[in-house]
Image (cartoon, helix red, strand yellow):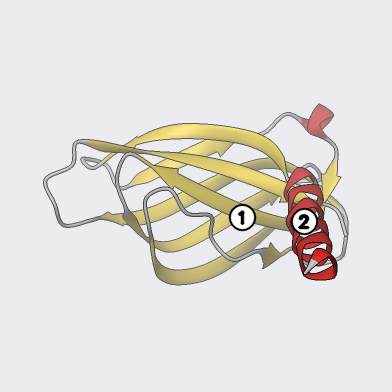
Amino acid sequence: MKKFLTLALMSVLSCGVMADDWKKLGERRVSFQSEQDVIHVSGFKGKYDNIAFKVDRAPIFMKKIRVVFGNGMSQTIHINKRLHRGKRSLPFRLVDGDRIINKVEMDYKTAVGGYKYAEVSLYGKRS
């Protein structure tokens, strides 16, 4: 029984360490009137090769995003998934490894439920 409790505690602690690898890069309160918004990211945040989103206050249906890098190049990622309130999305891998992110342009749809707005947070991770 002690071995089981020790193993369970170690797995919980390791999940906490994994969660700390994700750094919050920015956030945006998105209104359901425009259905297009931008999260600006400072180049001082560093280089990342994975991004993910967390949505609070209301769910949204994310159609696609366009990640604009520090060198002006961009990557479009078609998501086409509902992002649930209080949950983090699956990670999305950026092309060409570690990249400085300048901004993320979001194209989304209003979720059903009469919500006025949602809060979308952008996270980055280095492998």
Q: Nearer the viewer, residue 104 or 59?
A: 59
Helix, strand or loop under label 1 = strand
Q: Earlier in the sequence, mark 1 or mark 2?
A: 2
> Relative to the observer, which residue lies in front, 105 or 14?
14
Q: Position of residue 55 (x, y in %)?
A: 43, 46
Q: What residue appears at the point 46 percent right and 50 percent down from the top-left corner? A: 106
Left or right, 112 with reference to 42: left
Quadrant placement of the N terminus: bottom right
Q: Residue at x 35, y 56 (%)?
A: 108
Q: Dot 2, crowdedness within 10 Å: few (<14), some or many (≥20)?
A: few
Q: Give the residue at mark 2.
A: 9
Q: Position of residue 66 (x, y in %)?
A: 57, 56
In the figure, 121 relative to 49: above or below? above
* Mark closer to the observer (1, 2): 2
Q: Secondary structure at mark 2?
A: helix
Label 1 environment density (alpha carbons within 10 Å; few <14, some 14–19, many ≥20): some
Q: Residue at x 53, y 40 (%)?
A: 121
* Residue at numbered disc 1: 52
Q: Farthest left residue?
A: 114
Relative height, residue 6 to residue 119 (above, below): below
Image check: 12 left or right of 110?
Answer: right
The kind of residue tagged 2 is Leu
Q: Which mark is residue 17?
A: none
Report, in whole angstroms, how far the alpha carbon at label 1 lies from the one at label 2: 26 Å
Instruction: Please provide percent x and percent y for residue 45.
Output: 80, 32
Using residue 14 as the reference point, say whether residue 92 is left or right of it.
left
Answer whether labels 1 and 2 touch (C-beta < 8 Å): no
Instruction: Identify the residue at the far front of this view.
Output: 1
Q: Is residue 22 above or below residue 51?
A: above
Q: Amino acid at mark 1?
A: Ala
